Image (cartoon, rainbow, N blue to C red):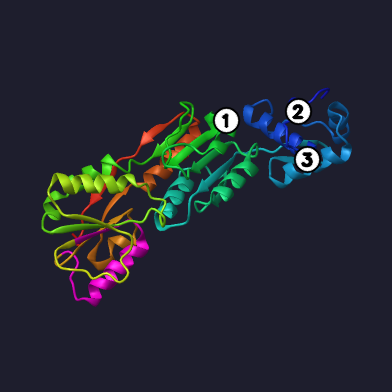
């Protein structure tokens, strides 16, 4: 081939090796280079680009390590077949995120490679992981940190290749999303369960915005529901050193707080679902069986995973706010 089928993008802040890697990856993702297409030899690309042979060789070696290209004695360097790679950045590992990933993986063809990482709501980690991923993947699936908007570093990703999950309403119309409603949907769920909730005399929400990334809109939703139905309401930051009393409903966001509520109720010989009510956020298989079942307000994370897989396979824009449901069990 006389000339490379791609243009070398000399971006500020990138080394020459990074420029080559990024340019070849972008050419593959844009369709300028397809599976099996030959790449210039080290000597040819060095001559065409003005970069040293050592620079070209190191760039090719990185691309081989990432399973993007291959080399053979009779063919030289060429684009590796089935090189579709997905960058998936979740917030943390939990039972319901495991459901999401399992559904996502099951609905993808086996030849799709998924690199799964976690940011644990650390902005520095988030920015670094996204920054390091740029130009290396065909699709980016990201659980955002900010609930109200999209993290600025995500603007560096082609909007058509980016999918926001769970939290964060994108400002750009070109960015796809599959998110939850943490406000009015929660109030609607509580309204749906009003008959069960009215059996109790007080609703206590365990929520500390400094200890959980869960959006504070849920506090407003619960408060509004209680005010509307004349149910006394309290928001406490944790359950440690607190006494449970008959007639209370304890609504927990974090599973660690749920565990403490159940332990305290047993310690005080209070029967959940009779003496005290227990409501939790986000369903897990364990909540289906603990104490004959914990009532939950939840979205369907398996559905979130399957929709994310459809986005990856079809590469068509999606803008979905998943429904939030109340699942009543013995704890209410």
Q: Residue at x 23, y 44 (%)?
A: 187
* Residue 137 appearing in the image: yes
Residue 25: quarter of image: top right
**Residue at x 46% of width, y 26% of height:** 173
Q: Which residue is mark 2?
A: 8
The correct choice, above or below, for 5 with respect to 228 in the image is: above
Report whether 167 appears left or right of 287. right
Marked residue nearer the N-terminal end (2 or 3): 2
Magenta region: 249-273
Image quarter of the C terminus: bottom left
The image position of residue 146, as x and y in percent, is: 45, 42
**Nearer to me, 77 or 307:** 307
Mark 3: secondary structure: helix
Mark 2 or mark 1, earlier in chain: 2
| Label drawn at residue 158 | 1
Q: In terms of secondary structure, where does tag 1 sit? A: loop
Q: Residue at x 18, y 70 (%)?
A: 271
Q: Is residue 73 visible?
A: no
Q: What residue is at 31 percent from the left and 49 percent from the top? A: 298
Residue 59's tag is 3
Q: Where residue 37 appears, x then y in whole percent? A: 72, 30
State the separation of the CA atoms marked 2 and 1. Answer: 18 Å
């Amino acid at each position: 081939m006389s000339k490379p089928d791609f243009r070398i993008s000399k971006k500020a802040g990138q080394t020459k090796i990074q420029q080559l890697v990024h340019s070849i990856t972008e050419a593959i993702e844009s369709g300028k280079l397809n599976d099996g297409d030959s790449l210039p030899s080290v000597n040819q690309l060095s001559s065409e680009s003005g970069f040293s042979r050592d620079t070209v060789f190191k760039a090719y070696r990185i691309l081989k390590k990432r399973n993007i290209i291959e080399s053979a004695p009779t063919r030289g360097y060429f684009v590796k077949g089935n090189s579709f790679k997905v960058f998936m950045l979740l917030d943390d590992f939990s039972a319901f995120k495991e459901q999401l990933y399992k559904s996502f993986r099951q609905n993808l063809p086996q030849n799709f490679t998924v690199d799964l990482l976690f940011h644990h709501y650390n902005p520095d980690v988030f920015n670094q992981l996204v920054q390091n991923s740029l130009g290396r993947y065909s699709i980016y699936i990201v659980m955002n940190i900010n609930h109200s908007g999209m993290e600025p570093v995500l603007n560096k990703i082609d909007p058509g290749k980016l999918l926001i999950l769970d939290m964060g309403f994108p400002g750009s119309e070109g960015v796809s999303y599959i998110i939850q409603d943490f406000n009015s949907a929660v109030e609607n769920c509580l309204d749906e369960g009003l008959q069960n909730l009215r059996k109790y005399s007080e609703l206590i929400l365990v929520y500390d915005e400094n200890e959980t990334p869960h959006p504070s809109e849920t506090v407003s939703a619960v408060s509004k529901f209680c005010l509307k139905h004349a149910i006394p309401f309290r928001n406490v930051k944790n359950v440690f050193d607190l006494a449970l009393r008959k007639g209370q409903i304890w609504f927990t966001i974090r599973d660690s707080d749920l565990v403490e509520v159940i332990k305290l109720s047993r310690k005080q010989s209070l029967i959940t679902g009779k003496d005290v009510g227990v409501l939790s956020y986000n369903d897990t298989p364990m909540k289906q069986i603990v104490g004959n079942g914990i009532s939950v307000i939840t979205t369907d994370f398996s559905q979130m995973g399957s929709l994310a897989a459809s986005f990856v396979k079809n590469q068509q824009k999606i803008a979905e706010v998943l429904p939030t449901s109340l699942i009543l069990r013995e704890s209410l």
